[in-house]
Image (cartoon, grey):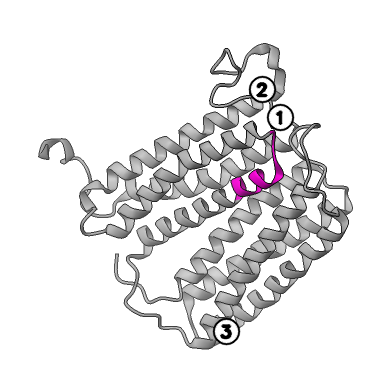
Amino acid sequence: MKGLFAPLPTAIDARIRFFAVASLVANILIVGSGGAVRLTGSGLGCPTWPRCTDDSLVATPEMGIHGAIEFGNRMLSFVLVLIAIVMFVLIWRMRTERKDLFRLALLLGLGIPAQALLGGITVLTHLNPIVVGLHFVLSVVLVALATVLVYRVYLGQRGPRSDAPGWLKGVTHLDSLLLAITIGVGILTTGAGPHAGDSAAARNGLDLEWLEHVHSWPAYATFAVTIALVVGAILRKEPRLRRFAILLLVIEGVQIAVGITQARLGLPPLLIDIHMVLACCLVSAMTAVVLSLRERQPA
């Protein structure tokens, strides 16, 4: 048994760093892949689940490009599974000393089949907008967990206390709350929009134009609070917090520009997909901002 686990690391090494980053990147990219499925009208390219059809596990030539796109997205889940398994194995010998990494790797591994199951329910409910929204929410949670994993791998375990003043913590948590509201309203907006994934799929019945305006309000508020957060981090001379807050601010600026552009151009699919991926990038950056509030221990 000892020989079996001998090659595995007992401390953070390049392999663990690589697969931690790979987990984060893959969880973000699969959102873009899922968005492509929906935005090309391929949501029911494989009309059943877990098989692609009643008689085939894979897409058939008769199903055309929509079947290929939908089945390709399903296959990406196996890439995530492989990354999660390798990460879990690499952490195994450190499971006592670094329980935080072990738990994160386990949660990410369990989240992938949960995501696949929810994706199956999405197909079986014929792309119900509520289920589709929950599917995206779970993706956001996995992105946040993967970000924590990367952060802990590179910057060490959680510190014993927060060394930030109360007002700075308050601004940070207000920022994260506003981002969560923005994403939530964005999910409702998407559920009212024209890109349902299939021409026969239901919409949530809400007014799209009104929701687009409502969606922008917390987005602009988030941007304003992030500016205050950057200023606060600079004044307090918090280099880690400043670095992640500036990254967050830049992504927010790009996201707002993409959002305004897509609304004025009539919601082109490519910009919507970019908007979804950027939302996950925002969640990742915000997670890093919140984590940087607490004093770290050496890795």
Residue at 67%, 41% (x, y): give it: 35
Residue at 57%, 84% (x, y): give it: 232
Question: Residue 39's image quarter?
Answer: top right
Quick check: 192 above or below 297?
A: above
Q: How far from the left and from the top, in percent, is residue 86?
A: 34, 39
Q: Which residue is mark 3?
A: 232
Q: Amino acid at mark 3?
A: Gly
SS state under label 1 = loop
- Residue 263 is left or right of residue 96, and the answer is right
Proximity of marks 2 and 1: CB atoms separated by less than 8 Å: yes
In magenta stretch: residue 131: yes
Residue at 46%, 38% (x, y): give it: 113
Q: Earlier in the sequence, mark 1 or mark 3?
A: 1
Q: Which residue is mark 1?
A: 42
Q: Main secondary structure of the magenta part?
A: helix
Q: Quick one: label 1, few (<14), some, or many (20+) residues within 10 Å?
A: many
Residue stretch in magenta: 126-136
Q: Which residue is mark 2?
A: 67
SS state under label 3 = helix
Q: How far from the left and from the top, in percent, is residue 233?
A: 54, 81
User: CA–CA distance between discs 2 and 3?
Assistant: 50 Å
Q: Earlier in the sequence, mark 2 or mark 1?
A: 1
Figure quadrant of the N terminus: top left
Q: Earlier in the sequence, mark 2 or mark 3?
A: 2
Quick check: 260 above or below 276?
A: below
Residue at 49%, 65% (x, y): give it: 288
- Residue 231 is left or right of residue 188, and the answer is left
Q: Amino acid at mark 1?
A: Ser
Figure quadrant of the C terminus: bottom left
